[in-house]
Amino acid sequence: MDDSQLITAAPNDDNAFRQLVAKYYNDMLVVARAIIGDSIADDVVQEAWLSIYKSLDKFEGRSSFKTWAITITANEAKRRLRKESQTTSLEGLIQGMEPSMLERYDDTGRWSKPPTLWHEDSPDSLLSNQELMDCIQHTMGNLNEQQRTALSLKDLEGLSLDEICNIIGVSASNVRVLIHRARQRLFQHIDHFQETGQC
Amino acid sequence: MLKCKEVSELSSDYVDRRLPWRQRAGIVWHIFLCVHCRRYIRYFRLTIFVSKKAATPPPDHVVDSVMDRIAKDTSDNPPD
Ligand SMILES: [Zn+2]
């Protein structure tokens, strides 16, 4: 069955609903983790599924089911974040480049510290280096909340900039910058790892 | 000609194909001539690729916990 058939069947058919959960749970978990952290992300996603279960008849198919589910998850995560009053301001001061990246250029805009020649410079060789993959996960975990959310939605979930704007509630140009700085930060860490063997 | 720093600033828009053709052509020309930026753009693409793969693996038995949650809610709030 495709999504629209599953959604139609789900209110009266547990098996159809289970298929939807299995298909989209991880996408939602990525978003919940990005907004609120690991510890209660699963809880947020379960709560989101409960909302989805109750409002399946309101799904109109204007966006994809995935986008709808992710939006509900993001709203639930943000509601919890407010409740736990750890909320950070969502429209911060944003510059176009990762600060540590800026330091690699001189006053004339040329490289003063160009990229190292990477030992591993094919996708496969990078992926097979477990220490490096750990380093990347670690770096992602240390991105600030906005950067991590924007990066996850774009590069992991493949959403468009417009969809991301709606979910995290910042302007398109700020989403663009959040993603760019997160990627540059990751680049910096991989480059450093290739040079020194350390994260 | 674009500066190396400007190539860096535009690199996400470039790899995501979001640039107007004139700026895109400017970057293509720059990385044709500049070995450092050529390397940077290649590594930047690799960075995006491997970061996608470093995403956390899926947890097991999640579906059951969702169904339990819904069952519990339904028994706490039975329909009229
Ligand atoms: Zn250059």
Image (spheres, rainbow, N blue to C red):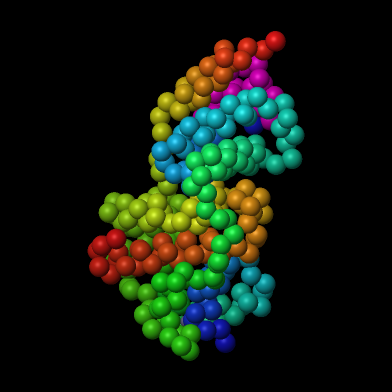
Give the magenta-colored segment's residue range. Answer: A4-22
For the point 32% across and 55% down, the residue is A135
Out of B2 and A199, give the one closest to the viewer.
A199
Q: Quadrant of residue A124?
A: bottom left
Q: Can residue B69 be seen in this view?
A: yes
Compared to residue A184, the image places residue A45 above or below, namely above
Magenta: main secondary structure: helix
* Displayed quadrant of residue A105: bottom left
Q: Residue at x 59, y 23 (%)?
A: A17
**Image side of residue A176 versus residue A59, left or right:** left
Looking at the image, residue A153 lies above or below residue B80? below
Residue B48 image position (x, y, % from top left) = 46, 59
- At a point 42% along the width and 50% down the height, the residue shown is B53
Q: Say which quadrant the N terminus of chain B sits in.
A: bottom right
Write the residue at 55% across / 66% down: A93
Which image quarter is the C terminus of chain B in?
top right
For residue A106, above or below residue A115: below
Residue A58 or residue A75, whichever sits in front = A75
Give residue A187's position: percent from left, percent from top.
Answer: 41, 65
Q: Nearer the viewer, residue A20 or A198?
A: A198
- Percent x, y of residue B63: 49, 25
Which quadrant holds residue A116?
A: bottom left
